Image: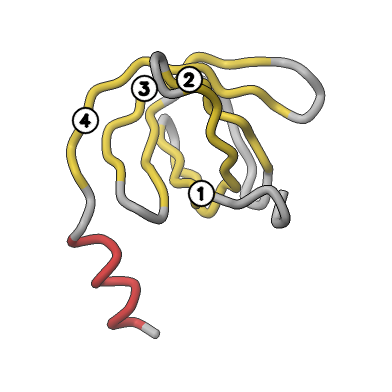
Amino acid sequence: MRTQSWAARKDRHCVDIDALAFRADGTKAPVTLINLSGEGCRMEAHAEFHVGERLQIAIPRMGRIKVQVRWCAPGSVGAKFVVESDF
């Protein structure tokens, strides 16, 4: 499994995209996407998120993308893209 994790990380692309994270309760928080891959993204944010939390990330010109938080650190959060059936 460790090899798969490393493989996913090498395909990440650095970005700098301002977006909004919408929570299940309807609240929103500004975030900045700092990297993307085919499987997920890393965001910087002042808001606190929780592992397992499901969000919709509104990205300009791309619409909303559904994600699940996989890890959190002060000021940073990693999320995995999920499909409608997973959400």
Residue tagged 1:
81
| As drawn, 8 above or below 33 | below
Return the residue nearer the eye: 30 or 67: 67
Is the residue marked by circle 3 packed among few (<14), some (14-19), or many (20+) residues within 10 Å? Answer: some
Query: How far apart in space, not on screen, are marks 2 and 1 (Cα)?
Result: 21 Å
* Picture layout, residue 9 above or below residue 12: below
Whole-angstrom CA distance, mark 1 to mark 4, is 16 Å
Q: Position of residue 42 (x, y in %)?
A: 37, 41
Q: Earlier in the sequence, mark 3 or mark 2?
A: 3
x then y, percent, for residue 16: 24, 23
On the picture, is 67 further left or further right than 19?
right
Q: Which mark is residue 46?
A: 2
Residue in view at x 19 percent, y 43 percent? 13
Vertical comparison of 85 with 8: above or below: above
Q: Which residue is mark 4?
A: 15
Q: CA distance from mark 1 to mark 3?
A: 16 Å
- Quarter of the image holding residue 18? top left
Residue at 33% x, 78% y is 4
Mark 1 element type: strand
Q: CA distance from mark 2 to mark 4?
A: 18 Å
Hey, what amino acid is under mark 4? Answer: Val
**Disc 3 marks which residue?**
32
Q: Amino acid at mark 2?
A: His
Q: Label 3 vs label 4: CA separation?
A: 9 Å
